[in-house]
């Protein structure tokens, strides 16, 4: 493991994916890769998102870059999303950098969601974690594969960022007892919760 810290990123990726490597070594190598996410290039991030283990892919769902190689938290990402809206609405010079950075972040996120090693449990942990951004919740809610799974729909209903339209759609297929349990611990805005309850009460 001391030697692994000196390996190049893609050498670590090969080690982590090798069937001959013991499981505990793979976990340690994954941890080294995750620790490097703040410094790797966009191209490396995209490759890791597509090909790395599920743990690394899940970390990339939460670890987004600012465009200068540094990582930022979900609040910073949401600020960038607001900047992008300003660009689209007013075409303010200088804000296009933020819009391009948001587009890069979304590319990495989408690539990670397509990773075949990403599991349902990892997606659920990501959207329910304190670092989950509105962009991540929306990406999972729109994803052709993940958005169809009942457990993930229930997890999305517990977040603070799901839109009313998606919340109404997802709640229809969740049994009433489970929906009550989900809404009891949900961070959705109160008006959305109230609308979901009214819809369920009006259903035959």
Image (tube, helix red, strand yellow):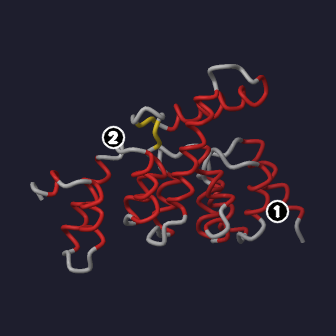
In this view, the residue in front, 52 or 27, is 52
Question: Residue reaching furthest top?
Answer: 93
Q: Quadrant of residue 190?
A: top right
Residue occupied by mark 1: 200
In this view, the residue in front, 124 or 186, is 124
Residue 53 percent coordinates (x, y): 37, 66
Residue at image position (59%, 59%) is: 155
In this view, the residue in front, 145 or 84, is 84
In this view, the residue in front, 179 or 104, is 104
Residue 193 percent coordinates (x, y): 74, 49
Q: Earlier in the sequence, mark 1 or mark 2?
A: 2
Relative placement, left or right, of 7 versus 91 is left
Residue 60 percent coordinates (x, y): 44, 52
- Which part of the image, by quadrant, shows the N terminus? bottom left
- How many numbered dots are placed on residues in this image? 2
Residue occupied by mark 2: 39
Q: How crowded is the residue under tag 1: few (<14 C-alpha within 10 Å), some, or many (20+)?
A: some
SS type, badge 1: helix
The image shows residue 165, relative to residue 120, as above or below, that is above
Residue at image position (59%, 31%) is: 80
Q: Mark 2 and mark 1 in contact (Cβ < 8 Å)?
A: no
Q: How crowded is the residue under tag 2: few (<14 C-alpha within 10 Å), some, or many (20+)?
A: some
Residue 3 percent coordinates (x, y): 10, 56
- Which part of the image, by quadrant, shows the C terminus? bottom right
Residue at image position (35%, 41%) is: 38
The image shows residue 126, relative to residue 26, as above or below, that is above
SS type, badge 2: loop
Relative placement, left or right, of 66 versus 201 is left
């Amino acid at each position: 493991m001391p030697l692994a810290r000196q390996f190049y990123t893609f050498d670590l990726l090969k080690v982590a994916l090798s069937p001959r490597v013991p499981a505990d070594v793979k976990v340690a190598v994954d941890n080294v890769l995750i620790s490097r996410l703040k410094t790797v290039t966009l191209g490396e991030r995209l490759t890791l998102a597509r090909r790395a283990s599920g743990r690394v892919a899940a970390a990339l769902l939460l670890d987004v870059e600012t465009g200068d190689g540094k990582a930022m938290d979900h609040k910073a990402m949401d600020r960038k999303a607001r900047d992008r809206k300003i660009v689209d609405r007013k075409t303010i010079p200088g804000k296009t950098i933020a819009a391009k950075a948001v587009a890069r972040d979304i590319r990495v996120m989408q690539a990670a969601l397509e990773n075949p090693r990403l599991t349902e449990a990892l997606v659920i942990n990501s959207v329910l974690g304190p670092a989950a951004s509105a962009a991540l919740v929306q990406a999972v809610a729109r994803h052709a594969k993940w958005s169809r799974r009942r457990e993930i729909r229930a997890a999305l209903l517990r977040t603070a960022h799901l839109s009313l339209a998606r919340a109404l759609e997802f709640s229809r297929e969740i049994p009433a007892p489970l929906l009550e349990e989900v809404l009891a611990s949900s961070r959705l805005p109160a008006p959305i919760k109230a609308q979901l309850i009214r819809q369920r009460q009006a259903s035959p």
